Amino acid sequence: MAQAQSKPIDFYYWTTPNGWKVSIMLEECGLPYSVHPVNIAKREQYEADFLAHSPNNKIPAIVDPEGPGGRPISVFESGAILQYLGRKTAQFYPTEERARVSVDEWLFWQVSGLGPTAAQTHHFRLFAPEKIPYAIERFTNECTRLYGVMDARLAAHPYLAGDTYSIADIASIGWTSAWERQGQNPNQFPNVKRWLEQVKARPAVKRGLALAAEARQVRP
Ligand SMILES: N[C@@H](CCC(=O)N[C@@H](CS)C(=O)NCC(=O)O)C(=O)O
């Protein structure tokens, strides 16, 4: 980290896979933060206060009071937040171009592929009032394909971007943790299973996943 953070980062959060990306990253970086719960079940993501930071009505979002030039900056979209915090702290986001391209590839793979597909799979399998076989099959099968891609990658490399744990891994932990709810059989993907056990053993990942949305607190 270039300079110690003296004011906490405001973190707009709810206990979901997209929220966990940022709680894990904040914990990994050792940054102080203050949790602002946004209860998406109560539609708080549509309130004007939150909209000022997240125009797309979705968590997560952050406001860093010590942004570029020492002035506050707000950031929405989980991938943009991970990249911002990675650049700010020079952690989990390499500066060497080849390594950075690799991280970006797998980060974008997560935010455009695994994340939205897993979310739709949850929706159609678990929450849709009407169970539509076509939709369930389509999204479950696409999840299976994506876990196959991830498994092949992790058969050849310890982490998604290569040899080093990065924001690409951090982005994928939350949704992968719930893969059985996406109709997946973890034994079909031994390399993803190995990776998931390895990353979930990290103390910061444990703290990030355990963060209770109700805990409105400033962490030292
Ligand atoms: N592309 C967004 C997706 C964020 C997202 O889908 N957040 C969900 C919770 S996991 C949410 O806020 N849902 C509320 C809603 O859709 O109204 C990101 O990566 O940050």
Image: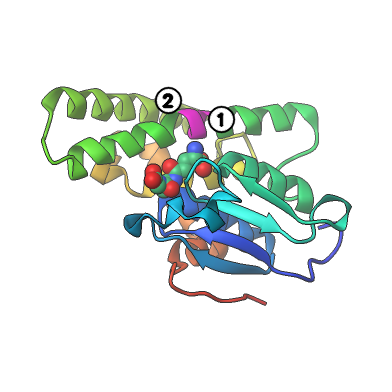
Q: Position of residue 67 (x, y in %)?
A: 79, 54
Q: Residue at x 18, y 40 (%)?
A: 128
Mark 2 → mark 1, Cα distance in angstroms: 14 Å
Q: Position of residue 214 (x, y in %)?
A: 43, 72
Q: Residue at x 48, y 29 (%)?
A: 112
Q: Based on the picture, tell me whether residue 111 belongs to the magenta stretch.
A: yes
Query: In the rendered structure, which amino acid carries the disc numbered 2?
Result: Val
| Eye-nearest disc, 2 or 1 | 1
* Secondary structure type for disc 2: helix
Report which residue position mark 2 lands on: 149
Quarter that holds the C terminus: bottom right
Quadrant of the rendered image containing residue 29: bottom right
Q: Residue at x 48, y 55 (%)?
A: 20
Which region of the structure is painted magenta?
Answer: 108-112
Q: Count the marks: how many?
A: 2
Q: Residue at x 52, y 51 (%)?
A: 60
Q: Main secondary structure of the magenta part?
A: helix
Residue 44 versus residue 180: which sits nearer the camera?
44
| Badge 1 density bin: few <14, some 14–19, many ≥20, Cα 10 Å | some
Report which residue position mark 1 lands on: 108
